[in-house]
C-alpha cells in the first residue's frame, strides 16, 4: 500500500493544475495517468487558444501542455505515475492502479478526479466500419502519431472540434470533402470556420449522415438534408466517396470512478451527460473527493485549468495547508471562471452548473 | 501513410524496426503505437466483432473504447492504439473474445 496526501487521477490540464496548486501550498501529491505522457487532450491541439492572458490565450495547446508537464515533473512534492490506469475506487478509500502489469494500491487522504471525457458516436447504418473515427482520434493520429487516417474525409459536426480538426487535416495534407452539421447554424467560432471555408471546404448545415457504405472498410457515405423539424427530406441525398468519416458530435464525461465511489450524480444535458453534484469547493457528495475539468461537465481547457486550481487549493487547505495569499488566489480563480462562463457563450454551462449544486 | 511535411509540427521517430502483421513483415518505428505503424502501412482493420464478425478499426485512439483489440505476441485483447511497437512483434487480427494460453 502506498500512502499519499492527495491523489489526482488524470494528468490533463485540470489534473496538472490541481497538482501544482496543491503542491504549491505544501501538500504531497501523487498524480496518476494512463498515458505515457502528461497533458491529456492538450497534447494534440496545435491551434491557438482563446480567452484571457491568465487562461493562456493565443498560446497553442501543445505548448501549454509541455509547460505544465515540465513544472509538475520538476516539482519534488509531486510523484507522477504514468502508464498507470486507475481501475477502481474501494469503500475503504483505496485507489486501485495497474501499472506495467502490476497492481498497485494507493491510499490518499484526499482524491481529485480529473479523468476528462470520451467522444460520443452517432447511430447510422454501417457506423462500425474501419475508417469511421472520433474526430479526436484522428487528431491524435495526425498531430501526435504523424500518420494520415486515409485520403479523403467527411467531417460530421461543425462545432469547434469538427472545424479545428478539419483545418488540421488540411495542414497535414489530407483532403476534407465537406463538413456537415445537423443544426441550422454552425457551433464553431467564426475565425476557425472561415479558415476552412477559405481553404475550399464546403459546410453543409441542416444536413446529417444517412448511411455509410463499404465492404471491408469505409468507401463512402450518403448525406441528407433536414427540414425545420430535423426530418430528412427525400430526394436531397448527396453521395461522398470518402474513405474516412470523423464524428465530432461531442464528448461525455468519464465518470465511472465517481459512480463507483457512490457520489451523487445527475443527468445534465448542458454538461453533456451524467455528472457529479459538487459544492463551491468542487467537493462531491463524498467528503474528500473533488472533481475538476471535463469529468464534471464538458467545457474547455481554460475552464479545466481554473477548476483544477480550485480543487487543488481546496483539497490542500482541507488538509491544513495554508498560504498568506490563499484567499486572494482562490478569489482570483473564481473570478476567472466567472469570466469564462459569462455572456451568451457561457449560458449553457451556467444553466447546467446551476443544476449540480450541492 | 506518414505525414512528410507539416507547417507547425515536426515528428520525431525512434529507430526503424520490423514487425509482423498476420505473418507479413512490415516496418515501423520503435515506440510509436502499433495502430500508428499499421495505419502508416495502410492497414486499418484491427479485429472482428464478436457476434457478426464485422471488421473493426480504431475509434478513440486513446485507449478508451476497445474497438482496436488485437492479438500481440500471443496475448489477446491488447489495445493497439496505446500499446507501443517493439522489434519483432507479432500482431494478429483478433477473432472472438480471445483466449489466454
Ligand atoms: C479537438 C479539440 C479542440 C479543443 N480546443 C480547445 C480550445 O481551443 N480551447 C480550450 O480551452 N479547450 C479546447 N478543447 C477542450 C480541452 O481539450 C478539454 O476541455 C480539456 O483537455 C479537458 O481537460 P481535463 O484535464 O478535464 O481532461 P483531459 O485533457 O481529457 O485529461 C484527462 C486525463 O485523464 C486520464 N485518465 C482518464 N481516465 C483515467 C484512469 N482511469 N486512470 C488514469 N488516467 C486516466 C487521461 O488519460 C487523460 O490524460 C479542445 C478539445 C478537443 C478534443
Ligand atoms: S481505439 Fe479505442 S481503445 Fe483503441
Image (cartoon, helix red, strand yellow):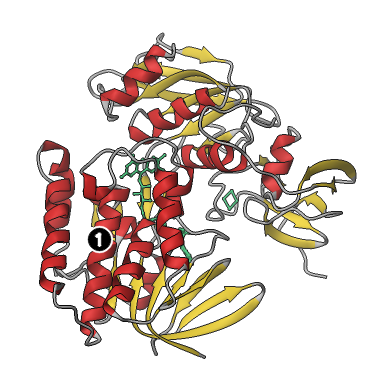
* Total number of numbered discs in the rendering: 1
Q: Quick check: can you spot residue A181?
A: yes
Which of A197/A205 is in front?
Answer: A197
- Residue at 30% across / 53% down in the picture? A273
Tell me if the residue at label 1 has its CB under 8 Å from ligand 1: yes
User: Numbered disc 1: what chain?
Assistant: A
**B3 relative to A210 in the view: left or right:** right
Q: Quick check: can you spot residue A276?
A: no
Q: Which residue is mark 1?
A: A307
Q: Quadrant of residue A191?
A: top left
Residue B10 against residue B61 in the figure, above or below: above
Residue A81 in the image: x percent, y percent? 53, 72
Residue A340 in the image: x percent, y percent? 17, 47
> Within 10 angstroms of label 1, few (less than 14), some, or many (20 or more) residues?
many
Q: Quadrant of residue A228?
A: top left
Pick out the residue farthest to the top: A235
Which of A96/A327 is in front?
Answer: A327
**A116 relative to B90 in the view: left or right:** left
- Residue at 24% across / 82% down in the picture? A287
Amino acid at each position: 500500500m502506498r500512502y499519499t496526501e492527495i491523489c489526482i487521477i488524470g494528468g490533463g490540464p485540470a489534473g496538472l493544475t490541481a497538482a501544482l496548486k496543491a503542491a504549491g501550498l505544501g501538500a504531497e501529491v501523487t498524480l496518476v495517468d494512463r498515458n505515457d505522457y502528461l497533458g491529456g487532450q492538450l497534447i494534440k491541439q496545435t491551434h491557438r487558444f482563446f480567452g484571457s492572458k491568465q487562461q493562456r490565450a493565443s498560446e497553442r495547446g501543445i505548448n501549454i501542455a509541455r509547460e505544465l508537464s515540465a513544472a509538475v515533473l520538476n516539482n519534488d512534492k509531486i510523484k507522477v505515475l504514468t502508464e498507470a490506469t486507475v481501475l477502481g475506487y474501494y469503500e475503504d478509500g483505496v485507489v486501485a492502479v495497474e501499472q506495467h502489469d502490476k497492481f498497485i494500491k494507493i491510499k490518499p487522504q484526499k482524491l481529485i478526479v480529473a479523468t476528462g471525457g470520451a467522444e460520443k458516436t452517432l447511430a447510422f447504418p454501417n457506423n462500425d466500419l474501419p475508417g469511421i473515427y472520433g474526430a479526436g482520434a484522428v487528431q491524435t493520429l495526425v498531430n501526435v502519431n504523424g500518420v494520415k487516417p486515409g485520403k479523403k474525409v467527411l467531417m460530421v459536426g461543425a462545432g469547434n472540434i469538427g472545424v479545428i480538426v478539419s483545418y488540421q487535416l488540411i495542414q497535414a495534407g489530407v483532403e476534407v470533402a465537406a463538413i456537415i452539421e445537423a443544426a441550422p447554424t454552425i457551433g464553431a467560432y467564426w475565425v476557425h470556420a472561415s479558415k476552412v471555408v477559405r481553404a475550399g471546404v464546403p459546410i453543409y448545415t441542416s444536413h446529417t449522415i444517412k448511411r455509410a457504405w463499404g465492404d471491408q472498410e469505409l468507401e463512402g457515405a450518403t448525406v441528407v438534408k433536414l427540414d425545420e423539424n430535423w426530418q430528412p427530406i427525400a430526394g436531397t441525398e448527396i453521395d461522398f466517396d470518402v474513405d474516412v468519416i470523423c464524428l465530432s458530435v461531442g464528448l461525455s464525461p468519464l465518470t465511472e470512478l465517481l459512480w463507483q465511489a457512490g457520489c451523487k450524480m445527475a443527468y445534465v444535458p448542458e454538461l453533456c451527460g451524467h455528472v457529479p453534484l459538487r459544492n463551491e469547493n468542487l467537493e462531491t457528495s463524498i467528503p474528500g473527493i473533488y472533481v475538476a475539468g471535463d469529468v464534471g461537465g464538458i467545457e474547455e481547457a481554460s475552464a479545466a485549468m481554473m477548476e483544477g486550481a480550485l480543487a487543488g487549493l481546496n483539497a490542500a487547505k482541507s488538509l491544513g495547508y495554508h498560504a498568506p495569499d490563499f484567499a486572494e488566489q482562490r478569489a482570483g480563480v473564481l473570478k476567472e471562471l466567472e469570466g469564462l462562463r459569462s455572456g451568451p457563450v457561457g449560458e449553457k454551462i451556467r444553466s447546467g452548473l446551476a443544476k449540480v449544486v450541492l | 501513410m506518414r505525414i512528410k511535411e507539416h507547417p507547425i509540427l515536426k515528428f520525431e521517430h525512434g529507430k526503424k524496426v520490423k514487425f509482423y502483421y498476420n505473418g507479413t513483415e512490415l516496418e515501423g518505428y520503435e515506440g510509436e503505437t502499433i495502430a500508428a505503424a499499421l495505419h502508416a502501412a495502410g492497414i486499418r482493420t484491427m479485429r472482428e466483432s464478436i457476434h457478426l464478425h464485422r471488421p473493426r478499426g480504431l475509434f478513440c485512439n486513446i485507449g478508451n473504447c476497445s474497438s482496436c483489440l488485437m492479438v500481440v505476441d500471443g496475448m489477446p485483447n491488447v489495445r493497439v492504439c496505446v500499446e507501443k511497437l517493439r522489434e519483432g512483434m507479432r500482431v494478429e487480427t483478433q477473432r472472438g473474445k480471445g483466449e489466454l494460453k
